[in-house]
Image: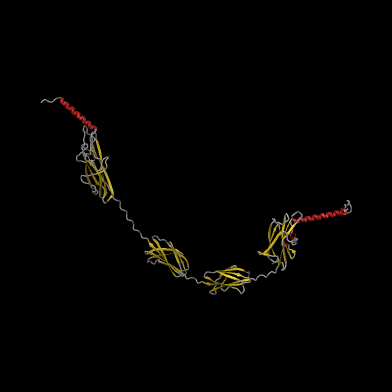
Amino acid sequence: MDPRRTRRPLGSPNRPRTWLRRIAFLGAVALLGLQTQLAVADPPTDNACQGAFQGDPEGSLTKTASRNGQPLEADDEIFPGDEITFTITWRTDDWVGDELDRVADCFQLNGENLTSLDVEEKPTANDGSFTHTITVPDDLEPGDKLCDRARLSGDPAPGNESTQKSNTLCFTVGEQPPPPPPGRITIEKQTDPDGAEQDFDFSGDLGDFSLADDESKAFDELEAGTYEVTETVPDGWELEDIACSVDEGDQSEWSVDGNTVTIDLAEGGDVHCTFTNREVPPPPPGQITIVKDAQPNDPQDFSFTGSFESFSLDDDADPTLPNSETLSDLEPGPYSVSEGAVSGWSLTGVSCSVQGEGGSTWNRSGNTVTIQLAAGDHVTCTFTNVKATTPPPPPPPPPPPPAISVDLVKVNDADEDGTFTDDETANEQGQDVTFRVTITNTSSVNVVIQSLTDRWPGQAPFPVSCDEGNLVGTVLSPGQSVTCTFTIANYAPVTDDAPGSVVDTAAVTVGQQGNEGNAASDQDDSTVRVEAVLGETVTPPAETTTPPGGVAFTGAEVTRWGLLALALLLAGSGLLWLGWRSLGEPEP
């Protein structure tokens, strides 16, 4: 029997020692488990990189390095203060683990771990990369060896760990080159004429400063680079030249654009630039003369305003106001002059002339002239105004024509007694009737008879033929009268056994002599009556009267009452004859 497996009875002398061993073993195991849990929960950096530089690279874990965007290769020189960027890339198609744990970038200096530069990160994907930048410590010495290698770790199965390592990059710390020598830029001021007291202001990359004639300002301890210096040229001066110089071998360069110099200062360069200004004499003054030309010459005042104080001009022999104004000692520039409006006058023109060779110009807009005055020029502008003429008053309207009036009175002598009235009874039915018309000029001027007509009911008016002659064209003076007598045959109405009447109307039209459009008219009626005739039949004569354009006036007609009366008359005559016969003839 194997003595190591021999069980000892309880209570033997060796039992307490055995239990002590067991308790110690269990405590060691517990302590080891606690350390393992702490390491897994928060692994320190030095443990992550422990052993990272042992063995060859495995799997697909690579890294690259660059400085200032330029790649670094193994054994390249680096210098304290350099910033080096590392990019770590992994691909897990060859990875045997189930879970990635961490990726670390580990550094060694001269074979010793340099934990201050170590970096580690928890991967978020099975394929990926991360980039970080370090600064080479300043305390490294020339010849030191700084090496870098990445490590990817994972856990493929409980209790097992798999690790991949990248290629190792080692760099040699080189001798730090001495800093480049500083440069200098000097700005100098020169003026023409010499000794001017004018200060000239400068600005740009060297700051703001001022210099007078023969003064200069040096700027030392300048790094190589580009510097701009600009001069603000004061009024009355012009920048004549900017000249720069350097010593032989100095690689500095410069260029001039207007009043600015751009200097590309080389390492240790020394550039001296001189700004030379020349005083510009003031331009000769100019003049503007304003002239007033009134047509015709008139004491009317015309006011002017604009770039100058207001003034007035007129154009007459009275010396109270002149007809021109000269404005002197004028600087070059724009000037405007406007003339105020004056009732009864119109501004018909503005013309300007230029004396001098400065190139002055002018233009007019309405009642304003704008002058661009050049140095030393004399511009004369004439404002011409014309007085409005008063039109003659319109002729008075012609007086209204005088009122024209006429009076017409019509009468008849139907009873043939020689007396005319406006209503008479004829002696018998169907007889001729004589009428008389009296025309009187009731106007204040002469009138001319234009027409005289007559008509009865149902009859159109017809011209009247007077026994005294044709009255149309007769001139009647104010108050003068003229008479027209005319007869109408068979005019008295025929009404047989009934009374009757007819109304006859005469009308006259007159016009003003010399203005016959100014006319007036009047009319009057005259009545002719007849008595009834009983037991008789009135046979009107065959003669009829037909007025011009009218219907024939036939006079009387036989009615049924007339036939009855005739029959009774004949019957009575027969009875009378029979009675006479019955009595017999008288004895002789």
Q: Is residue 371 above or below residue 556?
A: below
Quarter residue 438 falls in:
top left
Whether residue 375 sits left or right of residue 72 in the image: it is left
Where in the figure is residue 68, as x and y percent of width and height? 66, 64
Q: How many marks?
A: 0
Q: Is residue 409 above or below residue 262?
A: above
Q: Is residue 570 visible?
A: yes
Quarter residue 382 falls in:
bottom left
14 or 520: nearer the eye?
14
Quarter residue 243 falls in:
bottom right
578 or 213: nearer the eye?
578
Coloring applied to the structure: secondary structure
575 or 468: nearer the eye?
575
Q: Is residue 218 visible?
A: no
202 or 326: nearer the eye?
202
On-image quarter of the C terminus = top left
Where in the figure is residue 282, as x and y percent of width and height? 49, 71
Where in the figure is residue 37, as x and y percent of width and height? 76, 55
Whether residue 545 sits left or right of residue 156 in the image: it is left
Identify the residue at image location x=17%, y=27%.
577
Residue at the left extreme, as displayed: 588
Whether residue 404 sits left or right of residue 381 in the image: it is left
Where in the figure is residue 269, as x and y percent of width and height? 62, 72
